[in-house]
Amino acid sequence: MMDKRLVKISKTLSMLLRHHPEKLGLVLDQYGRTDWKTLVRRFNAHYQMHLDRQVLQAIMAQSTKKRFALEGTTIRAVYGHSVPVMPLTPATEPPQWLYHGTSHQAATVIAKEGLLPMNRDFVHLSEDVATARQVGARHDTHPVIYRIAARDAAKNGILFYPTSSRVWLVSELPARFLHHLTSYFRRP
């Protein structure tokens, strides 16, 4: 588990690389990559915190979410962007089932409209129920968990993009491919 200092740096990096690169004048390429040395220099000057390659590697090694990737001279957020980026990996056939955790409030809309990216580029799907539950618990103490008929959706033309952190990205998903898991659906 990361110490508080690394968590704070990680959250700040997430904000910068996913949502507001302009805050430090960072330029992201079409895949969301930027020069890691430029990021470090500007981060340290702006936030008065110590960031270097070793700190980046410690965050990446200690985080269970695997939010960042250092690739040669660049760094990128692996998923979660609200700024437009292209998936780095090609569309791939997904597993039979994927999962999505959400709040009861959002579930009423999702049941009608399907999964939409809202203020992000992609919908995030998990490979297992436990991860989906953890994600959904950020929004609701007893989240709704949807099981996604991912392979069926792919056969119907929906593109799925895997990430190195076991999160799958999809631009949107019609409701017909969603099945809520009743064991998590009702509030106690």
Image (tube, rainbow, N blue to C red):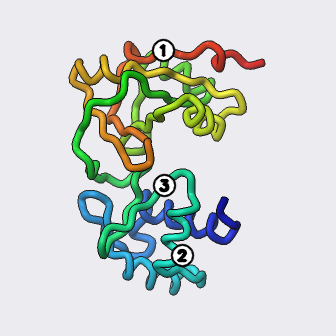
Q: 38 or 181: which is nearer to us? A: 181
Three-letter code for the amino acid on which mark 1 is drawn: His
Q: Decide if residue 136 is on the left or right side of residue 32.
A: right
Q: Secondary structure at mark 1?
A: strand
What number is the disc on residue 81? none
Image spot of residue 80 (x, y percent): 44, 49
Badge 2 amino acid? Val
Tags 3 and 2 in contact by the CB under 8 Å rule?
A: no
- 136 left or right of 113? right
Q: Describe the element under mark 2 as helix, strand or loop.
A: helix
Pick the front one: 37 or 130: 130
Q: Earlier in the sequence, mark 3 or mark 1?
A: 3
Q: Residue at the location (51% across, 22% down)?
A: 146
Query: Which residue is the site of mark 2?
Result: 55
Q: What separation in Å lies between label 3 and label 1 (alpha carbons)?
A: 27 Å
Q: Residues within 10 Å of mark 1 (few under 14, many from 20)?
A: some
Residue 136 percent across, percent down from the top left? 60, 34
The answer to which quarter of the image holds residue 22 is bottom left
Whether tag 3 and tag 1 are in contact, CB under 8 A, the answer is no
Q: Residue at x 64, y 28 (%)?
A: 143
Q: Does residue 90 sit above or below 75 in this rendering? A: above
Closer to the observer: label 2 or label 1?
A: 2
User: How far across and down, in percent of the image, does residue 171 sit?
Assistant: 32, 35
Task: Give the Cα distance between marks 2 and 1.
Answer: 41 Å
Question: Amino acid under label 3?
Answer: Lys
Image-based side of 111 in relation to 137, left or right: left
Residue behind mark 1? 179
State the CA–CA distance, disc 3 to disc 2. 14 Å
Residue shown at 44% from the left, 17% from the top = 178
* Residue 63 drawn above or below residue 5: above
